Amino acid sequence: MEKRRLSKGKIALIVIASIILLVGAFLGVVGILNIEFRKDNLEYIETSIRAVEYEEQLTPTYEEGYWTFTTDEEFKILQLTDIHIGGGWLTKTKDYKAINAVANMVTAEKPDLVIITGDMVYPVGAYGATFNNKEEIILFATLMEKLDVYWTVTFGNHDSEWYSFYDRQAVADIYSDSRWTKCLFEDDGDLYGCGNSVIKIKNSSGIVTQALFTMDSNSYMSDKLTDALLAAFSSSYDTFHDDQIEWYRQEVTKIHNENLALDPACPMFKSLLFFHIPLLETREAYNQYLQAGCQDTEDVQWLYGVVEESDPYVYSSPIDTDMFETIVELGSTQAMFFGHDHVNNIALTYKGINMEYGMSVDYLAYLGIDEVGKQRGCKVITVQPDGSYGSVNNNYYQDKYAIYPREVVSME
């Protein structure tokens, strides 16, 4: 009897169905692995990470729409940046190292406030086999809550990729969840970006001596898929938008007027600005320094640090906005702190404004960076009662940061 042959159409359907089943099975296995490995790190945080021990922890109050610290003493800020929690089965070990790095530095420094300047998570499937940035955020936020310190974040370009499960507004909602009792993150939904806010430091007379601006420097220059891909490969990063710049101007003016109402002779208050992607002026300042033979100029003064990113060295947005000019004009902000470029940690002064990279934590995003340690660390910022500040970069691999397990890496 002649055997009946399957038609080409049926064969194609069988092949397609088989591929779908295989892909579905693979994704199912990956999903289970991600849940289990994420659970391991979450369990480690919940059982092994302890609250930071303070002699007397400074507690903020919520006053007229602002989180406010009141003190006549020195105020200590710890800047962390580019944590890059992967949250998947492929990144379990690197996430564990990042968790311990954060825990070690926060525990040793005992800051009044921790500010993380973007890229807390890294929902890039090719690295972690997951695009679930919500679960990565929960892992990170749980760590900060276990440390029992006051903390807030600004968003980086990787916190909400176009392909990640949760967009920027959803990410803002996660950080705004009331379960994070020590998180001071706030989102002004009327502005471009998420998380534009001000934290005040007042003295006992009610005068604002320092304001901490946290702003969203946004992500790529377009949210469209094709443009986002081009931006990712051409470094076409976004920056502050006009309404954010106007908001900054209004907030500076408002706080200054509040101070004047208490003391008509009060000078302009001091402020610090925290965000993720450096301004175009940072690239301009560094290029001026290079062109001068690595010597100070009238506009640029070198403070400390190194640049180890490749040309163009500073991966800023190419967009020239009025943000820097507004900062200079208003005369409040002394310095800006950012991350984004993981192997840059310079601080320099440009036209009277300090521009400072934090030190990255990253074990994941840069190829092989988990085995190198000279760029890993934190920045300690101390604010004095008169509003002046000082800062120092601290490398992670020193004795005081060995409270929790820590790896051995190359410092070359």
Image (spheres, rainbow, N blue to C red):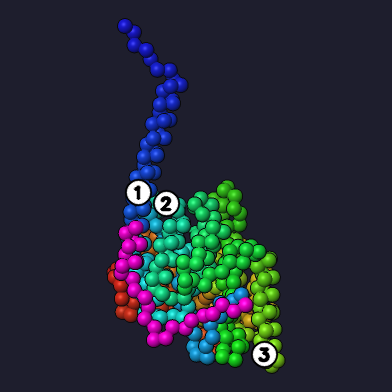
Disc 3 + disc 2, Cβ < 8 Å: no
Check the image and name the residue furthest to the front: 178
User: Mark 1, residues whose alpha carbon is within 10 Å: few (<14), some, or many (≥20)?
Assistant: some
Q: Earlier in the sequence, mark 3 or mark 1?
A: 1
Q: Which residue has dot 2 on it?
A: 130
How far across and how far down the image is residue 286, in percent? 55, 72
Relative side of 370 to 68, left or right: left
Per the model, the C-alpha gap separating discs 3 and 1 is: 59 Å
At label 2, the amino acid type is: Thr
At label 3, the amino acid type is: Leu
User: Mark 2, residues whose alpha carbon is within 10 Å: few (<14), some, or many (≥20)?
Assistant: many
Q: Residue at x 49, y 85 (%)?
A: 75
| Residue 228 in the image: above or below residue 185 | above
For residue 353, say whether it is visible: no
Per the model, the C-alpha gap separating discs 1 and 2 is: 11 Å
Q: Which residue has dot 3 on it?
A: 262
Q: Residue at x 66, y 76 (%)?
A: 251
Q: Residue at x 50, y 67 (%)?
A: 178
Q: Residue at x 30, y 69 (%)?
A: 48
At label 1, the amino acid type is: Ile
Per the model, the C-alpha gap separating discs 3 and 2 is: 53 Å
Q: Earlier in the sequence, mark 3 or mark 2?
A: 2
How far across and how far down the image is residue 150, in percent? 47, 75
Which sits in the foreground, 229 or 78? 78
Q: Quadrant of residue 322?
A: bottom right
Magenta span of residues: 39-64
Q: Which mark is residue 32?
A: 1
